[in-house]
Amino acid sequence: MASTLLTGIGELTTNDDELGRMRDAAVVVDGDLVAWVGEASAAPAADELVDVGGRAVLPGWVDSHTHLVFAGDRTAEFEARMAGEAYAAGGIGVTVAATRAATDAELAANLDRLVDEALRGGTTALETKTGYGLTVADELRSARIAAGRADSVSFLGAHLVPSEASDDEAYVDLVVGDMLAAVAPHVDAVDVFCELGAFDERQSRRVLEAARAAGLALRVHGNQLGPGPGVRLAVELGALSVDHVAFLDEEEVLLLAESWHGGRGTVATVLPACDLSTRMPLAPARRLLDAGAVVAIATNCNPGTSYTTSMAFCVATAVLQMGLTIEEAVRAATLGGAVALDRDAPRVGPDGRALAPLGRIRPGARADLQVLDAPSITHLAYRPGVPLVHALWRAGERVV
Ligand SMILES: N=CN[C@@H](CCC(=O)O)C(=O)O
Ligand SMILES: [Zn+2]
């Protein structure tokens, strides 16, 4: 692959502690990596030159929480919610029925459609989950379909106890037994919906401990619909992230912050579009940042609680309604997501291939760059709802 010099960058957000937010900058992309970052006047030569005309450049979005393997939609449920109905975990069952009835090709096509939609909106890396199959065969095909189409795949067999299960315990036995064994080769993490109406603390612990024993990373859906044990459990077991975190007391905020003292802790992932779509309180992202927690912003794209792939919408909401500065929100939606996926540093993939770090623009990082049709990242919140992706590179390849 030839090298490319991006020059004429009016504002460059690197997320790098030393490089910071630069003006009049240039970036060299070589193969799938960033090779050089610095002042435009000092840029080296490259095979190809792209002048971005004073526009802002930032890392591609890293969407660390989506549920994209599904069929059907839940428009009627959404309409009823907007007319005053409350959201309940049981709605997941509607999507489970539609997903089981779909062919592999239909599930793959829907996933491709959403990944492509996300890409056009500036998302260059994403995690997705199983969780709408809930049988060994349907979770396995969900994991297989997701693998290779997402940067990270989480097994969410513990999403809901399906209606055909004889009892909750028997279903958890299946999740930690045959289901986990079947999907493990295709996923890198295990997630659990730890919430009233889904899985309680003891059941969630069983799932997470089995995941850990299988050598997989842990994630938790926690404290979404009310106070609960999700955050404490996630921190105690060293989960990479606990997501939703809408209902937190001060102790839980501190626990999340302190999890980073002396090593890698648990990322608090906020899902602003989901909070709005379920008419729930917005997660206390400001309080979390003030306490020193590591925060990620993700879409939680799914047909029930958050049917959007737009990270830009989530960033704008975080700024306009959650009290984050634009720089904090952009960092949470790029580097924050990378940390939640444990991809903020070089890693080795399951096949032994080197995986370049995500979420920063600096030498050695994966060349995931978005060029905004705006002079600064401020426009992401200043002009909410306006599609601002002017150009996009993913792993060094120009895709927009
Ligand atoms: N909370 C659990 N799972 C999804 C909702 C899934 C659904 O309602 O279909 C979420 O993250 O919001
Ligand atoms: Zn979710």
Image: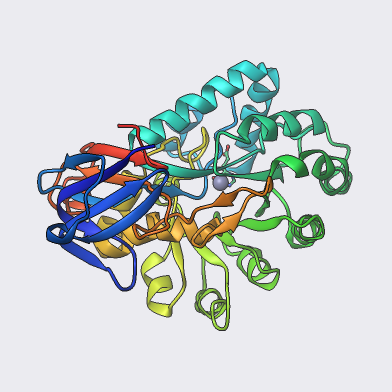
Question: Horizontally, is 193 left or right of 176 in the view?
Answer: left
Seen from the viewer's position, the closer of residues 51 and 46 is 46
Q: Residue at x 45, y 52 (%)?
A: 271
Seen from the viewer's position, the closer of residues 368 and 323 is 368
Question: Horizontally, is 251 left or right of 133 in the view?
Answer: left
* Residue farthest along the bottom direction in this orientation: 262
Name the colouring of the figure: rainbow
Q: Is residue 66 above or below residue 136?
A: below
Question: Horizontally, is 33 left or right of 107 in the view?
Answer: left
Q: Quadrant of residue 181?
A: top right
Q: Quadrant of the C terminus?
A: top left
Seen from the viewer's position, the closer of residues 164 and 208 is 208
Q: Quadrant of residue 117?
A: top left
Question: Horizontally, is 295 left or right of 147 in the view?
Answer: left
| Residue 353: percent from left, percent from top | 61, 48
Q: Residue at x 69, y 18 (%)?
A: 101
| Residue 39: percent from left, percent from top | 17, 62
| Residue 150: percent from left, percent from top | 55, 39
**Does any portion of residue 23 appear in the rendered image?**
yes
| Residue 383: percent from left, percent from top | 16, 45
Q: Quadrant of the N terminus?
A: top left
Q: Residue at x 55, y 54 (%)?
A: 225
